[in-house]
Amino acid sequence: NAGVTQTPKFQVLKTGQSMTLQCAQDMNHNSMYWYRQDPGMGLRLIYYSASEGTTDKGEVPNGYNVSRLNKREFSLRLESAAPSQTSVYFCASSEGPGLAGTRQYFGPGTRLTVT
Amino acid sequence: QKEVEQDPGPLSVPEGAIVSLNCTYSNSAFQYFMWYRQYSRKGPELLMYTYSSGNKEDGRFTAQVDKSSKYISLFIRDSQPSDSATYLCAMGYSSASKIIFGSGTRLSIRP
C-alpha cells in the first residue's frame, strides 16, 4: 500500500517550458488536492477534485491546470513556467468530499525550480 | 494580516521537556482545527484534529483550542528526538471549506 505517490521528485525548468506533475493514490479516496509550499507561506491550495469528474479552484490557481484522469490519478500542469512557480508541490487525497472535515494524506512532494 | 499566524522558530529544547507550539487566527468563523507534523523533505501528516473548542489528548500530544482568544496550542510531553520536525497548524470554516495553513514552526529536540 504505497499511499500517495508523486512523480517526479525533482525538476528544473526554464522559464516558458511546460510540464505535468503526476499524482496517484491507492487508498480508493474520492477527493484529491494539489498544494504548493513556499518558505514563510505555509501550504496553499492550488486546485482540488472533490470526486472523479469534478475539479475546483483553490487559493492560487493562476498559471496551473489540472486533470482528474480517473479516481486514482490527479495531474497538475504548468503550461508556461515562471520563476514565481518555484516551489515544493504536494498532492493529497482524502476519503470524503470535505476539506477541513476530513483527514488528508499527503505525498512526498515534487521540488520544482524554474530558472 | 494573515488569517493564521505561527511563529516560524526554530525552537530547540532538551529531550524530555514539555513543548508548547501555538497559532493565532483572526477569523472567529473557524470551527475545525488541525495540527500536522512534517519531517524534513516529507509530506505533512495529520497529528491532531479538533472540532470547535476544548482539549483533545492523544498519547504525549494535547491540542487546545481557545476560541475566545482565537488561539490554539499543541503540547508535547516527554519530548523525544523523533519529535524533531516542522509543525503546521491548520484551520477550516466548515467541513466543506478549504484549509488555511500556518507557515509552520521548526522544532528540534536535543538528545
Image (spheres, coloured by chain):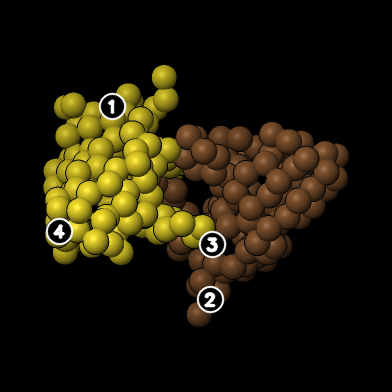
| Chain A pictured colour | brown
**Marks 3 and 2, the one that precedes in the sequence:** 2
B76 or B13, nearer to the observer: B13
Please name the residue that numbered disc 4 is placed on.
Answer: B16
Q: Secondary structure at mark 3?
A: loop
Please name the residue that numbered disc 1 is placed on.
Answer: B28
At label 1, the amino acid type is: Ser
Above or below A112: residue B68? above
Q: Nearer the viewer, mark 3 or mark 1?
A: 3
At label 4, the amino acid type is: Gly
At label 3, the amino acid type is: Gly
Please name the residue that numbered disc 3 is placed on.
Answer: A107
How busy is the neighbourhood of tag 2: few (under 14 within 10 Å), some, or many (20 plus)?
A: few
A51 or A13, nearer to the observer: A13
How busy is the neighbourhood of tag 3: few (under 14 within 10 Å), some, or many (20 plus)?
A: many
Q: Could you tell me residue A13's position as x and y percent?
A: 79, 48
